[in-house]
Amino acid sequence: MIGPGATLRRCLGEPRVQAGGALMIVLLLVAVFAPILAPHDPGDQDLLRTLAPPVWTFGGDWSYPLGTDSLGRDVLSRLIFGARVAMRVALFAALGAAALGSALALIAGYYGGWADWIIGRAVDVWMSFPPVILSLILMVGFGAGLNNVIVAIIIVDWTRFCRVVRSEVMTVTKRDYIPAARLAGFTHMQVILKEIVPAVTPLLLTLVSIEMGIAVVVEAILSFVGLSVEPDVAAWGVMIADARQSMYEAPWSLVAPVFAIFVSVLAANLLGDGLRRSVDPRLAQRLVVVR
Amino acid sequence: MVGSGFGIIYRRLLIAVPTILVVSVLIFVVLRLLPADPLAMSMPPNATQQEMAEMRHEMGLDRTIPAQYAIWLGRIVRGDFGRSIQFRSSVSDLILTALPTTLELVVTGLALGIFLGLGCGLLMFSWRGTLKEQVADVGSIVVMSIPEFLWAILLILGFGVAFRLLPFIGRMDAQITVPRATGFLLVDTLLSGDISAFGSALEHLALPALSLALAITPLIMRVLRSSLFDTYVDEYITLARLRGLSERHILLFHALKNAALPTVSLIGVQAGFMFGGTLLVEVIFTLPGIGNLMVQALHNQDLPLIQGIALVYCVIVLVINTVVEVAYLGLNPRLART
């Protein structure tokens, strides 16, 4: 028997979880303390120093460590404030999509029947549509704003959770201890909350951390085409779109936000992959069989 | 239950029709949330009240939303997608002009991605249990963390700006013209017999296709490796070894075909995601495909065009899903008999 304590220890001992978790914590701290960390206001323009080079190249200085963009705004400060947008979207969109998707998955997988049929068809319809296109259309309907982005991502991405969690719920529901719990006098709600939810939680955690990366990318795509946050908010996608206009003169202001998005997604993927490895018994078995 | 290839196509059609209907309702409802007035955008500023009312009636905007939907749907069934507000021309013409660019990009990107994914997956599996595998594993997570539009920018910075090896704007050098036969430049240039034009088209396609490919390569590679692990537990692998077949022969001729099934279904599941990725790749490489058209339509709130392109995206994902399912059946004939 492996208790929850042992699973937790195995998770925390997995190098991928450590690396991904550490990166994610750093990003969250940067987002929280952005006003203290950033050397300038992200909207401040120094029109005498537009497209200033970063500090390590000729002509750079410490007043703008990563240089400035075409409007003379500090790239580092915009990057740091951009983490606020990215991390808010990552956390709330991932948790929201997880909540909606797994609630529907529990209903579909546990009760089956017509509820399962309707939810299954809804997933099919959603899957037959490129998520990027759907989120763009939703944003045109909703209008700009961080909360709207979060709602749009939840509406688009709940299916990622629903599909996977539903089949896991169905597997768990077939196990002996579920009818046993019913015979012992548990209500359906109690069975779901006390037996099924704990059983699917490890899978859910893996999916949430991967979804955090996806949410960062979707927000970046939306802000790249100008359909995300309000125009005065610093977001990584907006930075990419701006820097693309001057990529010959100032390639670094283009590389910086690309790198920031990459690090966020990498953190989420490492965390997700590490969690999957440490909670998936099939994988542990496979390693024994093959090696 | 699955039936033959035709059975799948028939069954898929039965699913596709209601799916497209539901998608069209969703798009229609979401777009009616818009604060914008499509009427005001399609009329000159000096239009009289009388003209406005006539136009409103002509566009069906004086009806209820369900009635508007019914009119729109009725026209679509007859192949009439309406007129674009910003371009003042037929939506279906605009889409048909742009579609080959997108399809060319998807097909080359997908083919390249599958090729690289299978190659890397096999290589990584043959390294199993070594340090190389560990490195490749972490490497694949790193590559996986770069979505296609970031690949597009990185490839432009690397090959286009820093080394100036490959072009990254448009589909072909501006001074070359090729008569349009199919709209697929790779085909049209060959049909016209213009080899330098073909080369130019191929060069221009290289970076966009690679951006798409790199986004799917690590996924395919990881799924293939993992299903190869599952396959190698089976008895027939041991039997093949006992028969004295080489490891390479077993991997390529026995295990790969069986292990390919989860990879094929991954491509099916990911079809929507991959296809959506073309949108930003088109924008970044200024390719005149339906993704670029869609972004313009979204910015100008060109409702008829948005609705038309959205439906086209949906239809193409359904087509890709059907093709994948037929391929799945081809790889695993057992499914047809059960």
Image: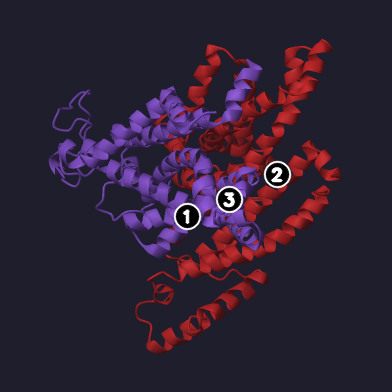
Chain colours: A purple, B red
Q: Amino acid at mark 1?
A: Leu
Q: How many marks are shown on the rendered structure?
A: 3
For the C terminus of chain A, give its image quadrant.
Answer: top right
- The one of B104 and A127 positioned closer to us in this rendering: A127
In the rendered image, residue B118, in percent from the top left (x then y), is placed at 64, 28
Count residues near mark 3 (Cα–Cα under 10 Å), then give few for <14, some for 14-19, many for 20+: few
**Mark 2 is on which residue type?**
Val
Could you tell me residue A58's position as x and y percent? Answer: 20, 23
3D distance between C-alphas at marks 1 and 3: 30 Å
Label 1 to label 2: alpha-carbon separation: 29 Å
- Give the quadrant of residue B259: top right
Q: Are marks 1 and 3 on the same chain?
A: yes
Q: Which residue is disc 1 drawn over?
A: A100
Give the camera-side residue of A185 and A204: A185
On the question of residue A205 being in view, the answer is: yes
User: Which residue in the structure is indicated by mark 2?
Assistant: B324
Of circles 1 and 2, which is in front? Answer: 1
In the rendered image of this protein, does residue B323 appear above or below residue B217? Answer: below
Q: Could you say which quadrant of the image residue B86 lies in?
A: bottom left
Label 2 secondary element: helix
Q: Are marks 2 and 3 on the same chain?
A: no
Quarter of the image where the N terminus of chain A is located:
top right
* Three-letter code for the amino acid on which mark 3 is drawn: Ala
The residue to which callout 3 is attached is A184
Give the residue displayed 29% in from the left and 38% down from the top.
A28
Q: Where residue B123 appears, x then y in whole percent?
A: 62, 19
Chain letter, disc 2 residue: B
